Image (spheres, rainbow, N blue to C red):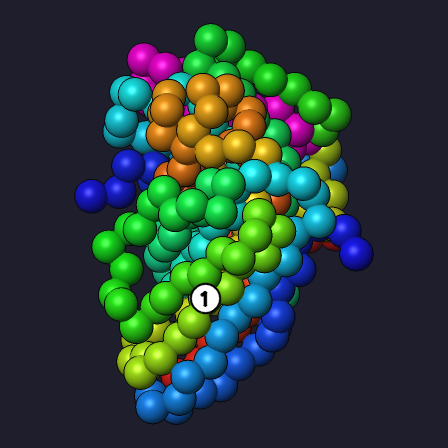
Amino acid sequence: ETGVTQTPRHLVMGMTNKKSLKCEQHLGHNAMYWYKQSAKKPLELMFVYNFKEQTENNSVPSRFSPECPNSSHLFLHLHTLQPEDSALYLCASSQDFGGGFAGANVLTFGAGSRLTVL
Amino acid sequence: DQQVKQNSPSLSVQEGRISILNCDYTNSMFDYFLWYKKYPAEGPTFLISISSIKDKNEDGRFTVFLNKSAKHLSLHIVPSQPGDSAVYFCAASAPSWGNLIFGKGTKLSVKP
């Protein structure tokens, strides 16, 4: 496998469910990201992990809980979500984060997990 | 307030002609700009970038122009091909920021 892989590709859940999104990168990158894409809105950064340490939490509600067990894997744990959380959740990775070399921040995205909250 | 704006949600162009996608930004700290392309059911893929020390960067059919005084950049695709039909996102970053700020995207349709 190469690149950034996200599972599941589609997820439907009720507001009381607990589910997780998984992301895996095979690029040897040091930084991993969760983005949210809602209809007619820009891509919104949610979380950033650099060398497994969380460096950004962009005022995301606590019903979204990230986990980065190692530099190749990233999870987004979901619980008691709201219908307005329905969106495409994109995982991305980059060689470095804020390393002073702008090109290091070129992101490689996964295909996304389409989440529908009923 | 949006720091990166793509004011045209969609653009339709005839095959073989030039496609011009525009992007405006407000933060003068931005020093690196990128374009991403997204097909349905796929994640965005990096297309081309430009540093603020340049005003033009070319890669095959794709050229990005940067006008710092106007805080404006544009992506030119020539000649346009039906396979170029996708959503194009403009993104920007600032020194030591690490994360990218994205625009809402412009959907390009290239008609045969």
The N terminus of chain B - image quarter: top left
* Residue at 44 percent of width and 55 percent of height: A35
Dot 1: chain letter: A
The correct choice, above or below, for B31 with respect to B15 in the image is: above
Q: Position of residue A62 (x, y in %)?
A: 27, 67
Which type of secondary structure does the marked residue at label 1 adopt? strand
The correct choice, above or below, for A41 with respect to B65 in the image is: below
The kind of residue on which mark 1 rests is: Leu
Q: Give the extent of the magenta segment.
A: B62-78
Within the image, what quadrant is residue B96 found in? top left
Q: Nearer the viewer, residue A73 or A6?
A: A73
* Residue at 42 percent of width and 45 percent of height: A53
> Tag 1: Cα neighbours inside 10 Å, few (<14), some, or many (≥20)?
many
Q: Position of residue B104 (x, y in %)?
A: 40, 49
Query: Magenta-highlighted stretch: main secondary structure?
Result: strand
* Residue at 62 percent of width and 40 percent of height: A29
* Residue at 45 percent of width and 66 percent of height: A76
Q: Nearer the viewer, residue B20 or A22?
A: A22
- Left/right placement of residue B40 relative to residue A96 reads right
Q: Position of residue B75 (x, y in %)?
A: 54, 30
Say if the magenta span includes residue A24: no
Residue B20 visible, this angle: no
Where is mark 1, residue-wise?
A: A76
Q: Position of residue B6 (x, y in %)?
A: 39, 42
Residue A79 visible, this angle: yes
Spot the residue most to the left.
Answer: B1
Spot the residue most to the front.
Answer: A69
Within the image, what quadrant is residue B37 found in? top right
